[in-house]
Image (spheres, rainbow, N blue to C red):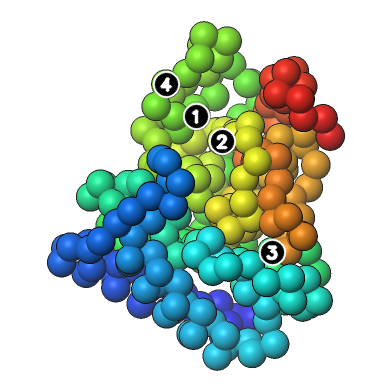
Amino acid sequence: MAELVDAVRAIAAEAGALALRRAREGFKRWDKTPGNPVSEVDLELDALLRARLSALLPDAGWLSEETADNADRLACERVWVVDPIDGTRDFVRGRNGWAVSIGLAERGRVVLGVLDAPAIGHRWWAAAGAGAWRGDTRLRCVTRTEFSGARVPTDSLPREDSDLVAVAKPNSIALRIAMVAGGEADLVATLRWGYEWDVAAAALIAAEAGAAVSDAFGAPLAFNTARAQAFGVLASAPGIHAAAVERLADRARLLGVTP
């Protein structure tokens, strides 16, 4: 696994460097759906990552935001779960809140995760049972036990969450989760159907840093599922996770979603 992690870190760094170079050169962009941007760089990175990662593990399946899904992956014991550029909105706007996200799922759980954010010069990685790291620094989430005052990466807080504290938010959900892993935030929560490729790598990084990670209802996340989706993601200091689940429960029901 150590050799595989090193190889994936090198591949992520190659992809990140390419994205950073292309950002400086200029590129075409368009909306896949209204408000959902994509660029030619997303597609270039997708092709690069698929070629490099498939060469590492030829038997592994493939699940990526920028590749048409193929149900053949469901029969694979191992599957690459990839977002070539997580945080494309920031990327196309020339902002820094994006990252290359690479996860490897094995029998439904992520066993390797790498995030490369070259615009801010940070790289995270984790392997199951081996801890979480940013560069050469081992990460530990905070030991917070009081929900009120928890730091949340967000643009603004709704009135019902005025007891929380907003901190700077990158567009990338993976980078927000990495903030929990590194102790720069206490809580990240979403209440929508999200795709596995958005959170695979970061979920492992946070968990290996000691954070509690689940869906919006507190259930474990599963990967390489048929829908490749889960309702919400919740990453927090372990001591406030139950309180976060409780706060989200009524809102989920109002949206018509139940566990």
Reply above or below: 248 against 13: above
* Mark toward the viewer: 4 or 1: 4
Q: According to the image, label 4 marks what residue?
A: 156
Type of amino acid at the residue the image marks with label 3: Val
Type of amino acid at the residue the image marks with label 1: Val
Q: According to the image, label 1 marks what residue?
A: 152
Type of amino acid at the residue the image marks with label 2: Val
Q: Where is residue 37 in the image (x, y as percent from the top left)?
A: 38, 49
Q: Label 4 vs label 1: CA separation?
A: 9 Å
Q: Nearer the viewer, residue 193 or 2?
A: 193
Which comes sooner in the sequence, label 1 or label 2? 1
Q: According to the image, label 3 marks what residue?
A: 110
Q: According to the image, label 2 marks what residue?
A: 188
The quarter of the picture where the N terminus appears is bottom right
Q: Nearer the viewer, residue 254 or 234?
A: 254
Q: Nearer the viewer, residue 208 or 171?
A: 171
Count residues near mark 4 (Cα–Cα under 10 Å), then give few for <14, some for 14-19, many for 20+. some
Type of amino acid at the residue the image marks with label 4: Ser
Q: Is mark 2 on a helix, strand or loop?
A: strand
Residues at marks 1 and 2 touching, judged by CB atoms closer than 8 Å: yes
